[in-house]
Amino acid sequence: MSSSITIRLDQSLSRLLDRLVKQTGRTRSEIVREALQRHLRLVRFDHLRRQVLPFAEARGYLTDEDVARQVS
């Protein structure tokens, strides 16, 4: 099952979207749906990262490099 929403875009964003539609041959809906999925994943990742950060810092993981060293 799917649902519909209506959003308002300013002119410049609408033009960018239409340009991408022409370049890729995809629909506006496909592009907006993919962009929303990516954004929601990033927001979720950021939220989880903020929750875990105090525990990671307590164990000495202060940077991405610290994590990379541990898993490499």
Image (cartoon, rainbow, N blue to C red):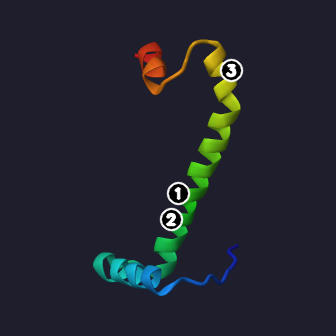
Tell which circle, 1 or 3, labels the residue nearer the N-terminal end.
Answer: 1
Q: Secondary structure at mark 2?
A: helix
Residue 25: x %, y % from top left: 33, 80
Residue under label 3, please give it: 55
- On screen, residue 42 above or below 53: below
The image shows a total of numbered marks equal to: 3
State left or right for residue 2 relative to residue 22. right
Q: Residues within 10 Å of mark 2 (few under 14, many from 20)?
A: few
Residue type indicated by callout 3? Phe
Residue under label 1, please give it: 38
- Label 1 or label 3, whichever lies nearer to me, is 3
Residue under label 2, please give it: 35
Q: Secondary structure at mark 3?
A: helix
Residue type indicated by callout 1? Arg
Q: Residue at x 70, y 73 (%)?
A: 1
Residues 28 and 64: in front is 64
Q: Residue at x 65, y 84 (%)?
A: 6
Residue type indicated by callout 2? Ala
Q: Confirm or deny contact between disc 1 and disc 2 (CB under 8 A).
A: yes
How many angstroms separate mark 2 from mark 3 (CA)? 31 Å
Q: Residue at x 53, y 21 (%)?
A: 62
